[in-house]
Amino acid sequence: MSKELQNIQTVVRDIKLLIEQSKQQIARSVNMTMSRLYWQIGEMINQEVMQNERGTYGEQIVVSLAQQLVTEYGTSFSEKNLRRMMQFARCFPDEKIVVSLIRQLSWTHILVILPIEDSLKREFYIQLCIHENWSVRTFRERIKSMLYERTAISKKPQQIIQNDLQQLNQNHPINPDLVFRDPYFLDFLGLSDAFSEKDLESSILRELQRFIIELGSDFAFMARQKRITIDHKDYYIDLLFYHRRLKCLVVIDLKIGEFEAAYKGQMELYLRYLEKYETADGEGSPIGLILCSGKSEEHIELLQLDKSNIRVAEYLTLLPSKKVLQNKLQMAIEIAKQKSGIGEEL
């Protein structure tokens, strides 16, 4: 290939890159402008309805506005969409917050979070979506999987949740309670009722991408069955990951059946070894995650695993009904709050 042809191809590639970048910038600009317009329309209608304080007036004005706007501007301003704009303005009454939000989330993303009534839960999903760069599809799946209720942060006092989310929003170090979940949904592995730890590990590696999605996008896979040698004896770590935002190694130990107290000593050995021999300068202490098919909360509490940087979580290879799961997660949150003396309602 001649030098002239190579130069032309380089120029073409660079021009294509510029075009694509410009298209993305235009799309973001259009999205921001339209999202802000929708908020302003919703705020205007809400103010009009509030000023007149008549029960039927709110219904009448939305229907009337939709009929006139659809005729001139199309179905984007249908009655259903106008009500979404009104809901958007009610959920986010501060225009400064709206301006910041629409810089980072598309209108389609915003529509996904509007049905969430709990403001803390809504903020949790917004921050995770922004920092993990979720697509709209992933965003919906994370909400559907009750991610908020499965993180330790949901069991904390309201003020602590607000502080942790604010820290995340300001790009400060992330709280591990926002990272680790309980339970983990591993139904995508397709495992039958009877399987071994080796089967579980092999299935995870076959579906590594989906497993990392369930863990969180900041996890990076490093090794399976990593051998460490202590006093001439070999030990094998099931799965070793690195968490980019926590800046630390994460050991995952896979167990079949209920959590047992002996698992703590085994994990502590792994963590202390990694801390001594494999932790780089500037990294945090390694964290251990023991995944079991069941656990006793009293065991966990008495062993004070948090002091050893160890977390225990259940995994579910077959998901119960949504109602059963909701009840289970809600009960876990209430029990945790009662133990810490918090009488808040979610």
Image: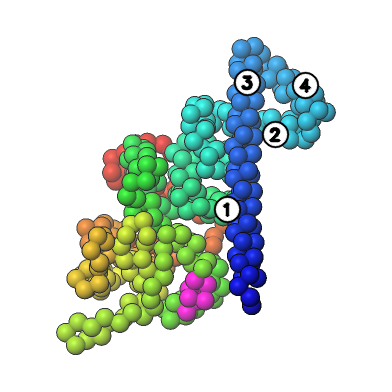
Amino acid type, label 1: Ser
Q: Which residue is mark 1?
A: 135
The quadrant of the image that shows the C terminus is top left
Q: Nearer the viewer, mark 4 or mark 1?
A: 1
Q: Secondary structure at mark 4?
A: helix
Q: Residue furthest top?
A: 52
Q: Nearer the viewer, mark 2 or mark 1?
A: 1
* Residue 320 or residue 315, whichever sits in front: 315
Work out how far the residue at label 1 is from the one at label 3, CA to CA, in angstroms: 30 Å
Label whose residue precedes the other's in the sequence (4 or 3): 3
Q: Secondary structure at mark 2?
A: helix
Work out how far the residue at label 2 is from the one at label 3, CA to CA, in angstroms: 14 Å
Which residue shows up at 55% across the image and 51% down it? Answer: 139
Asked if residue 211 is among those painted magenta in the image, a careful observer would answer no
Q: Which residue is mark 4?
A: 64
Asked if residue 206 is among those painted magenta in the image, a careful observer would answer yes
Category of crowding for the residue at label 1, using alpha-carbon neighbours closer than 10 angstroms: few (below 14), some (14–19), many (at least 20)? some
Label whose residue precedes the other's in the sequence (2 or 4): 4
Q: Is residue 116 above or below residue 51?
A: below
Work out how far the residue at label 2 is from the one at label 1, CA to CA, in angstroms: 22 Å
Which span is picked out in magenta? 202-208
